Amino acid sequence: MSHKINLRVWLSIPDAEAVTVKNTLVRRMGFQDVLVDVKKERLFSIEVDSGNPEELAKSFAKELVNENKEDSIVLFDELIFEGGYVPVKVALHIEDGEAISTRERLRNRLGFKNVVDVKKATIWKLYIKGQNQERVAKEIAEGLLINPHKDSYEILAKPKDYGLIAY
Amino acid sequence: MKIAVMQFPGTNCEYECLVAVKTVGMDGELFRWNRPAVELSAFDGYVIPGGWAYADRVRAGAIASKEPVMDTLREEAAKGKPIIGICNGFQVLVESGLLPGTGKIDMALAQNVMVSNKKIVRRGYYCDWINIKHDATPERCSGSFIIDKGAMLQIPIAHGEGNLVTMNKDLIRKLNENGQVVFRYCDSQGQELPEFPVNVNGSTENIAAICNPEGNVLGMMPHPERAFFSWQLPPHDPRKHSGQAGPGRLVFESMKRYIEVRA
């Protein structure tokens, strides 16, 4: 039976890229009155056609997460968030060489032949105050987070509390 | 003739560019990104060197393109002053909408994809000496003002994201029709073969450099400042110890000549 293993990974040390994005949005792009904070995650969506998804997820996390500086959460067949921010998913709409390399590494070098596909994305977690949070998130995505000639973005469903499996 | 060599956090080719600017007889000055942007108006031309401005955070050139100095460079470009963006400088110009010059982000310099025999053989960062052919007419562009059409230059590249892609189906046609394609990757015979290693990064139609419609803003992925003196050429090159000028010098000489003609 096929499953999609969503591995959310974030830095446990300070994320300089997220800080730079926040500073640019606040100091250069006029979002100082609405933007409270910016955080960032990497997302691996790994499709497998067999095997125990929980065991596979542990193995994938060992390969894809550097526990010295990163934390992660695994979600099976769905993608949900904790709340308090607007999650914006940014991914390449042109061929993603890093995702292909990750799939080949898992399949051919590490022997996970049940890996069918790997997709990568960045989740920008935008802490926005006031009304029209989705509109602000859209402006931020189109103004800074993507180049439409290679990236696409998606404002994901409103976060909610949910039992998450943490590795 | 004063040239500002821009310096963002992470720029790493500014000193070579400064030497190049001064050696051809222009007054060069490093211009840090956090100086008052209005001071840029006192300069006659601008070089945005290569490197990793803001560590390529978000994507190459994206953060630097939001700096106030880029607003001033837009204003100065509108006056016809020359701007040459090299490698990361090209990426900054694309992200700021100065290139291809439609006023918006109309293309991307995406991750290199090296294709050989129709298969992807490599991706990402690549560093080598390559050949480029001048595809514009002389005097069309500030950075190739004195270069004959069809002239070939051997210049190094060093980048991970130089693959010109666009969702605007008309853009490439317009660039060709307007003579905005300044350099294309070619082999040592001048043939523009579409595959690696000639097309070194998978760029659409082997495009290595473009200018804006007016011709004063040039963006190029190869590094002319690294082929400015003949002693910078690779060991096997017979010109290495000749004492002649390196091929990259033509780009800076062109900028100077462009400013002289406009004066």
Image (spheres, coloured by chain):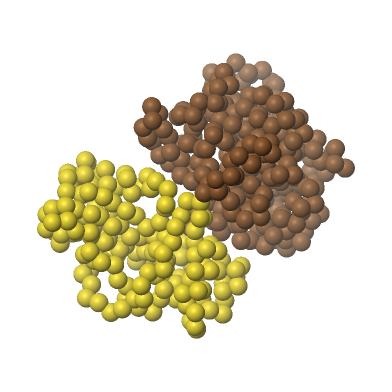
Chain colours: A yellow, B brown
Q: Note whether residue B12 is visible.
A: no
Front one among B244 and A121? A121
Residue ID at (60%, 16%): B238
Quarter containing the C terminus of chain A: bottom left
Counting labels gives 0
Residue ID at (72%, 55%): B73
Q: Residue lying at the far bottom in this picture: please name it.
A: A130
**For this view, does A148 lie left or right of residue A125?**
right
Front one among A85 and B105? B105
Q: Is residue A103 above or below residue A123?
A: above
**For this view, does B215 lie left or right of residue B231?**
right
Quarter containing the N terminus of chain A: bottom left
Residue ID at (20%, 49%): A115
Q: Is residue B245 above or below residue A163?
A: above
Quadrant of residue A24 in the image?
bottom right
Q: Is residue B238 above or below residue A164?
A: above
